[in-house]
Image (tube, helix red, strand yellow):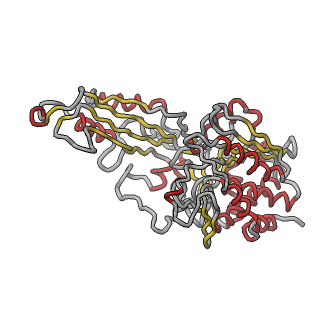
Amino acid sequence: MSNRQSALERARGYIDDGSFLQRLTQLVAYQTESHPPGRKKELERYCAEGIGPIVSALGFETEILPNPLDEHGPVLIASRHEGDGLPTLLIYGHGDVVRAMPERWRSDLDPWVLKVEGDRVYGRGVVDNKGQHLLAIEALRAVLEERGSLGFNVKIFVETGEEAGSPGLKRFLELHRERCAADVFIGLDGPRQSMSVPDITLGTRGGLALDLVVNLREGSHHSGHWGGLLKDPTVILAHAISAIISRDGRILVPGWTPASVPASVTQASRAVVIDDAPGALKPDEGWGEPGLTRPEKIYAWSSAIVLASISGQPEAPVPAVPGFAKARIQLRHTVDVAAEDVAPALRRHLDRLGFTEVEVVPVVERDMFPPSRTDPEDVWVRRIADSMTETVGHAPNIIPNIGASGPSEFFRKTLGVPVLWIPHSYGGCGQHGPDEHGLIPLFRDGLGIMAGVFWDIGLNPATRAEA
């Protein structure tokens, strides 16, 4: 008789028999760089010839829909409908990757050719994100092969522009709201915080950039004749920055940090288990908001950094008082900080301190990812956490939101669904850099975890009414 443990063993067996890595080899070979644009045909091929046939073979109906922004890649939606009264899962992945940068990889590695060395699997996209959405598909395969059906409805959503900021995604979801309708969003992306404790992440922080510009006069003027007489824009800018971020890394702008943090978010953040990989960076003691734990500083609070600054002629300094200085500040913030008030709040703060010479210019390079957070007490969070606990023998980390940004809110707000991310990579995987790799033990672990999640949802499909 089919049972849960058999489904988990079947899923993990795809690592042991080589079929998972064989399919991943095929997917990695597609050179799906999304930024800068120019690989649209390859992104279309990934959907039509790469991932599409894999899900079609599992009984999914597939369609490839154009991006509302014509220069960018399409979206693949694969659907399997088992019953009108059953819950529907929207499973997310992205088929695009960052620039391959082959010149920076180890000499015996090719970003587009999968290579296995011990427990490491090298190739561009093996964790971000081809290997991770393939993992979800293979876990569905295991349940189907073991039980003959899923017991719920599924829509697999694969976009091809996430690494370029998901251009057109928000508009796509608005245009195809009914086609994408679901009861819960499940995405597999990003690194786990611990090798031994799996994660459920419930959202992302928003990311905003602002330029501080001090433009006092045209040109530069002899420092011997004018130093001490003319205002130095670099000095003014430096003091303005020190009024925004303190010497010990605290944010000093009212409105840039949460006025309050929900108790469930604080509790979940403090319970997160973090295991640093060997050789990983360690947080600097005493830096950032005092009184917060390391997870709280990332998952429940804001962070601000100086991305770049310039004045004078740094490549060849000359003895002259410059007339211009500029710095770019980035703020990462949770849903507890209103994005639309970030720039006005800074303007009020600088005016109050007398920095009238400093102009605040919001940076608008693309549609920025807004902050997002699903309630840690949501019924889907509890249910999937219970499933993962049964599979691994202990509770997963419940992370209110990762520190980075992503498309979570586009789905949560437009489709009205809880958003859950279940990552299966690790901090040392090299994503976005040279020698990107996944770990076979984490792939194997993830296949078992996801097969358990899908098995349990199908075993008790009444969640739709509860959700």
**Relative side of 297 to 317, left or right:** right
**Relative side of 136 to 59, left or right:** left
- Residue 204 percent location from the top left of the image: 55, 45
Q: From the image, which quarter does the N terminus lie in? A: bottom right
Which residue is at 74% across, 51% downward? 50
Residue 442 higher or lower than 292, as above or below: below
Which residue is at 29% across, 31% downward? 214
Q: From the image, which quarter does the C terminus lie in? A: top right
In this view, the residue in front, 454 or 397, is: 454
In this view, the residue in front, 278 or 467, is: 278
Outermost residue, left side? 225
- Residue 466 percent location from the top left of the image: 76, 44
- Residue 104 percent location from the top left of the image: 49, 58
For residue 386, what is the image quadrant? bottom right
Which residue is at 61% across, 73% downward? 118
**Relative side of 251 to 34, left or right:** left
Can residue 273 be seen here?
no
Which residue is at 69% across, 60% downward? 25
For residue 39, what is the image quadrant? top right
Can residue 8 be seen here?
yes
In this view, the residue in front, 455 or 306, is: 306
**Relative side of 212 to 441, left or right:** left
Count of numbered labels shown in the rendering: 0
For residue 308, what is the image quadrant? top left
Residue 107 higher or lower than 84, as above or below: below
Residue 452 higher or lower than 152, as above or below: below
- Residue 27 percent location from the top left of the image: 69, 55
Residue 149 higher or lower than 304, as above or below: below
